[in-house]
Amino acid sequence: MKIKEKEFEEIMQELKSVADQLGASVRFEKGDFKGGYCIVHEKMVIVINRMTNLQRKVMILSTALKELGVDSIYLSPRIRGVIEEMSGIL
């Protein structure tokens, strides 16, 4: 699947919406880390380094969502394809 640069922002918003559906919050923080899924005070949190580029943020968020399990919720075929493809890159 070929994703154009200008589409990444829209995809990021849709992926954040999927995280909300799963009950996970998405946080963009500054630090010396790549990012991923964790549990903080019994809440699911996906932390992404705000200093990385947008494509990398989409990859990290896709991988975290796949770990959380998106099989049980409805996703548009496009977003499901993005999660499958992007999570396999990391």
Image (tube, helix red, strand yellow):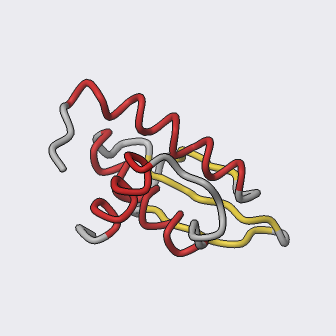
Foreground of the two, 79 or 65: 79
Left of 62 or right of it: where is 27? right
The residue shown at (37%, 49%) is 58
Up/down of 32 relative to 1, above or below: below
Q: Which quarter of the rendered picture does the C terminus lie within?
A: bottom left
Q: Identify which residue is drawn at 71% across, 51% down.
A: 21
* Horizontal and vertical percent position of residue 44: 72, 65
Q: Is residue 50 left or right of residue 86?
A: right
Q: As drawn, is 58 to the left or to the right of 45?
A: left
- Snapshot quadrant of residue 34: bottom left
Q: Position of residue 2 (x, y in %)?
A: 15, 44
Residue 30 appears left or right of 70: left
Name the residue rendered at 65%, 60% in the picture: 73
> Total number of numbered labels?
0
| Residue nearer the viewer, 51 or 88 | 88
Q: Position of residue 72 (x, y in %)?
A: 65, 69
**Residue 14 in the image: above or below residue 88:** above
Task: Point out residue 23 in the picture as x, y percentages from the top left corner.
Answer: 76, 57
Q: From the viewer's side, name the closer residue of 59 and 41.
A: 59
**Residue, far top:** 6
